[in-house]
Amino acid sequence: MTAAAPKVYSIPSGAPFVDRLAEGIVARVGDDPLALAEATVLLPTRRACRSLQQAFLRRSGGQPTLLPRLSPLGELDAGDLSLTDEELPGVPLDLPGAMSALNRQMTLARLILSADGMSATTAQAVRLGADLGRLIDAVWTERIGFDRLDALVPADYAEHWQTTLKFLTIVTEVWPAILGATNECDPARRRNLALETQAALWRAAPPRGLVIAAGSTGSIPAATDLLDVIARLPQGAVVLPGLDQRADDAVWQAIEGDEAHPQHGLSHLIRTLGVTRAEVRPWTDAPEPRGARARLIAEALRPAATTDGWRQLDASADQPEVPESGFDADALDGLTRIDAATSEEEAQAIALLMRHALDTPQKTAALITLDRNLARRVAMALSRWGIAVNDSGGQPLAHTAVGTYLRMTAELAATRVHPLALLALAKHPMAAGGRDSADFRAAARALERVALRGPRPAEGFAGVRAALDQAVRFDHDEQPAILRDWLDDLERRAAPFLAAMRGETPLADLLRAHIAFAETLAADHESEGPKRLWRQEDGEEAARFVHDLLDAAEGFPALPASDYPALLDALMSARAVRPRFGLHPRLFILGPMEARLQHLDLTILGGLNEGTWPPNPAADPWMSRPMRRDFGLPSPERLVGMSAHDFAHACGAPEVVLTRAARVDGTPTVPSRWLLRLETVLKALKLSGRIEERGACWLTWARRLDEPDRVQPVAAPEPRPPLAARPRRLSVTAVETWMRDPYAIYARYVLGLSKLDPIAADPGAADRGQIIHAALDSFVRAFPDALPPDALSRLLDLGAEAFGPLLRSHPDVWAFWWPRFERVAAWFIALERERRPQWRTLATEVTGSLILQGPGGPFTLTAKADRIDRGPDGLVVIDYKTGTPPSTREIALGFAPQLPLEAAMAEAGGFRDIAAGAVAELAFWRLAGGDPPGEVKPVKGDPATLAAEARAGLEELIRQFDDPATPYRSRPRPAMAPRYTDYAHLARVQEWSLGGDGDGE
């Protein structure tokens, strides 16, 4: 019996595919509605099926109609197999179920963790399991079989690839047994079985109604076999998307050998179906719209081997009507290009285009992109107009409110109640602890202010409670008891989960304890925890995720507590949450696959940079590129060709805008190869720059969208508080700040603003200075006269006491600070042995004061001198410096008055228990701990003169600021501005200073 000739058709890329498809189906079945209902249409995706439903609805004018049976080509299930074993013996219809993706991922991760030579954390094993699952699916899709692993010679590859190859061999031996035990199979094999079974059914018993497979490019071999069967059915037909029937034979031959060409997949498909291009007929008689643009895109994407044909374009560009060229400016109708400076600007321009599309009734618009960051930026930009765009990619579960909450509860336990993890969780809107959520967060903020800012407390709730007990500043008398109750209740709720996180626990038990804690913490004063936690789209998806993970976690080995948050994040990141309601019906954000066969009035192709579209080949941790080639898996060029087909087909929309950003996240980018090819062709045709001109206005509007009508530079602040509000008591170090940055004095002492300490702060340079000061102070107090024989050992012991638990809790302190202190200690003891015969220490860390008179009344100057010695010629005032001492010029100009003012205080007898006397020397002792470890730096100049000048300068400063008209300016002398200030952002220095860039801080 002679096989029927295949019936293959094509719909041009510029035509609305689903509308033309519906038109052709109706034309073939006639006016009989039952005949239409008997038809079967197979399409690439579910979204394409929904689009075809809408096309039939448009054709019927909104009237009820019976639709064909619509199915995604790659997702046939048992319900699609209509015959029985008796009707078709020899064809197995009871297909095994596909193992769920999460269950397979966790099972493969378990094999990876137990394999020899495969060192990985649990989260890494889970990610590798997902990659291995994709490799297995690719093997089934290509019908290769893992027995071909034997053909790969390990000696041909690097050592780590040899280890990987050995593991793959083990998996291929173990994996079939695992699947057989559960009577399941891999998803790709299940799809192949469904396609093969459907092909066998229709080959043996062709259906009575029309059977059409439309929009497929034949990238799946099993699907190609089914297409071959459909094309030969009595009432079957295969409808191709945008087959190029204009290319000459030489170009088409080159296409057949160029996997990166958009038509390569279709060329392979029609060869497999046994037809030539000439035998592929139009699906309808309607003329092709935008044929000139289709020819232009085809010319730009011609095979690399035939690009010498562009020379003919250049030769005939001055004669646009001659046949050799065949192109004119009409080919650019509806085509626009936008080259933005940054991805943020690109997103703003795209959002403007989509918002403008809504001004035309019934007009639809979509952004098609592979750049998920760009998609999120566009969605956010549209929200400024209250538009919730329909984003097919959705949002990763890990980034939603519930996903973030689950991750934070895990982090709290894994970090043993680190203050940052505790506050992040307590401030999350889902956390309520049986109270009103606002009151719960208010308690967390109060705990932060009074107990958690500053040095990190000990781990666990006990450490936080100890920090609370040591706190001294509270907002009101009842606050300590309120916060203790809040903390005790939170500890009670978290206790079972914290217990499960000690040591190693099976994943299923860990997950149950985690969810129990998350639910009890989510309860508020009105609702139970599960009701609050598992509602709305993200809660529902999270509930499904937890259910699936509990099923997949049975038998998973125990894992360290530190691995659990990363594991949870890796798994949740692979789940998408897609809102079902409240989305705009005419605006979409689609990936190239979802955009296939869609009918849109405005199509924006975004992120057209090399590496994004087309994307760079994904790194395969299981096979290198040569291994994949030798094994028989598709080359990266084939994926580029599929991506190119999506690009070329999308360029057939009525309006097309091509966008890219010159920089993405600060990194320069390269335009997509397709844009570069289009540039080359347009340049040869003397049409370069035209599509860019159309996009210039959108860039201008995007840039002006957030620009103010006018820019009014802000003046430097000049606060003038009344005299009664101005400080009458300052330390010598604050006087230096007063000289350099009066505004900082205003903010600190008039407004009462002080910098908040970091949460759970690690020790910094200031802490190192305080520790060294404390150690030296203790040593000098303990041995004010003669030094003991073991002086260095005694000082090191005092240093260890001053460092305290930091030496055990912070490896960097032990590795870097302690060796420096050891060098400082040795230098200090050597210096003390040299000085002690002539100098006697009078006091260390001694406080003092000096009262000065001003127009506004007495002014008190305070100080704490690091050390005061008495030598043969008088007093010596010493200041320990672990940083850089001020320069001689700064001291002479009065901008570093600390030591001169302490000298004036010493001359006046202002230091406790030290009689007034002449100051013979001022000195900085630099204690760097480097090379040299220490250094004595005497202040140049006569101490008495320096002291007198400093006192006079301070009295003049007091006199000036006792005048209410004197402002507290910020950095009045920029050259002498402090190296660091806590109040620069409050003074808005970046907005008005000469060197500011206007961005603020």
Image (spheres, helix red, strand yellow):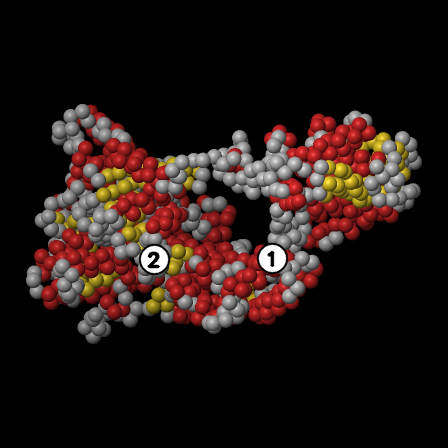
Does residue 71 sit above or below 975 in this rendering?
below
Q: Say which element carries label 2.
A: helix
Amino acid type of the residue tagged 2 in the rendering = Trp
Label 1: element kind: helix
Can residue 449 be seen from the camera position used here? yes
**Residue pictured at 47% horizontal, 49% vertical:** 161
Q: Which mark is residue 448?
A: 1
Quadrant showing the N terminus = bottom left
Q: Which of the two residues, 650 or 252, is positioned nearer the viewer here?
A: 650
**How far across and down, in percent of the image, does residue 143 sit?**
32, 56
Q: Quadrant of residue 290?
A: top left
Image quadrant assignment for residue 51: bottom left
Q: In the current view of this chain or complex, which residue is farthest to the left?
A: 31
Q: CA distance from mark 2 to mark 1?
A: 55 Å
Q: Residue at x 30, y 68 (%)?
A: 95
Q: Which mark is residue 831?
A: none
Horizontal and vertical percent for residue 736? Answer: 69, 36
The image's mark for residue 140 is 2
